[in-house]
Image (cartoon, rainbow, N blue to C red):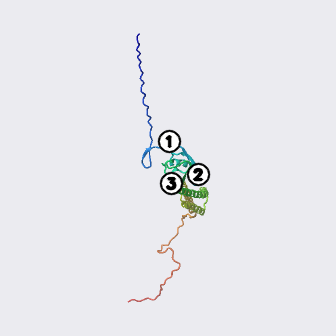
Amino acid sequence: MMKRSITTTSKRRKPKAPPQQLEVAIDWEVRPGGMLVQKRSPVGSDPGCATAPFINIKVSHDSYHHLLSLPSTSTFGDLKKILARETKLEAKDQRLLFKGKEKGDEERLDMAGVKDMSKVILLEDPASKERKFVDKSKNHAKMLAYDAVMKVRTEVDKLSHKVAAMETCAKNENKIVVKEVEVLTELLMKELLKLDGIEAEGEAKTQRRIEVRRVQGYVDILDNLKLAQSTNHFDQTVPAVSVTTKWETFDSRIGSLTAPKHVQTSTKITKEWEQFE
């Protein structure tokens, strides 16, 4: 009996290719101190924030209290951004105090010891308060200046109607009373002095400049009307020189053309003659 030899061939498996490593782009940022570090992901986008527990924080601001919930790995800068939406106070104007110490924007809540229902105090930066007070004072001064200019404009509007009426009379060759022109000019000059005494900025300054030019224009119109009226009056009152053919006869005597009626003299005329040797 013959034995069969069975030859078995084993299939070799191809080695698996090593898994490809994904290249992750790293964003870098420069910290205020000049150090180059990996850019921190915002709250909610950091994978670590998804696993970090959320904590509730009580923030006291003047007489108001805010209850906020955010990841424990958030920074005080992140907390300021949330408070900016709640209080309308910009993050740069906020000061956050925890356990009596002011915290920087880069400090993390959990590292500073902030836990669930911890209390944080929000204060407004004194420089911000002073800046707002100055801005408020400037705005108040601008409003007062603007109102003062508008009051002058109202008075000038009334006087402008009288100027227009005088212009119409002059165009119609009607007589204008010079005294009325002078009074109206004086009233306009008083309004011009009021404008000169108004300290204005911004829009109020622009409106004041417009009114000054407007008043000066009305004064020029009145000056021209007064000059024209004076010229017409002069032409009417000065008599014309008449030329006649009547001639006057003069004596051929030397001396005055008209002899005096009575001439007094101190010379005494006598008939006594003085003899000379």
Mark 2 and mark 1 residues within 8 Å of each other at the beta carbon: no
Viewer-closest of 158 and 131: 131
Q: Secondary structure at mark 1?
A: helix
Which mark is on residue 65? Answer: 2
Q: On the rendered image, what quadrant is the N terminus found in?
A: top left
What mark, if any, has residue 48 been given in the picture?
1
Residue 101's disc is 3
Q: Alpha-carbon distance for marks 2 and 1?
A: 29 Å
Please state which amino acid type lies under the numbered disc 1: Gly
Identity of the residue furthest to the front in this view = 1
Q: Are marks 1 and 3 in contact (CB under 8 Å)?
A: no
Of the 4 image quadrants, the one containing the C terminus is bottom left
Q: Would you say the residues marked 2 and 3 are in contact, meaning their CB atoms lie under 8 Å apart?
A: no
Residue 251, position in %: x, y? 49, 73
- Residue situated in front as seen by the camera: 244 or 217: 217
Place of residue 2 in the rendered image (x, y in percent of width and height, measured from the top left): 40, 10
Compared to 70, does 182 lie above or below?
A: below
Residue 54 visible in rendering:
yes
Question: In the image as oriented, which residue stretches furthest toward the left?
Answer: 277
Q: Amino acid at mark 3?
A: Lys
Of label 1 and label 3, which has the lower sequence position? 1
Which residue is drawn at the image coordinates 58% and 51% (left, top)? 65
Question: Which mark is nearer the camera, 2 or 3?
Answer: 3
- Number of residues whose C-alpha sits closer than 10 Å to that of mark 3, classed few (under 14), some (14–19) or many (20 or more): few
Q: Earlier in the sequence, mark 2 or mark 3?
A: 2
Q: Is disc 2 placed on a helix, strand or loop? A: strand
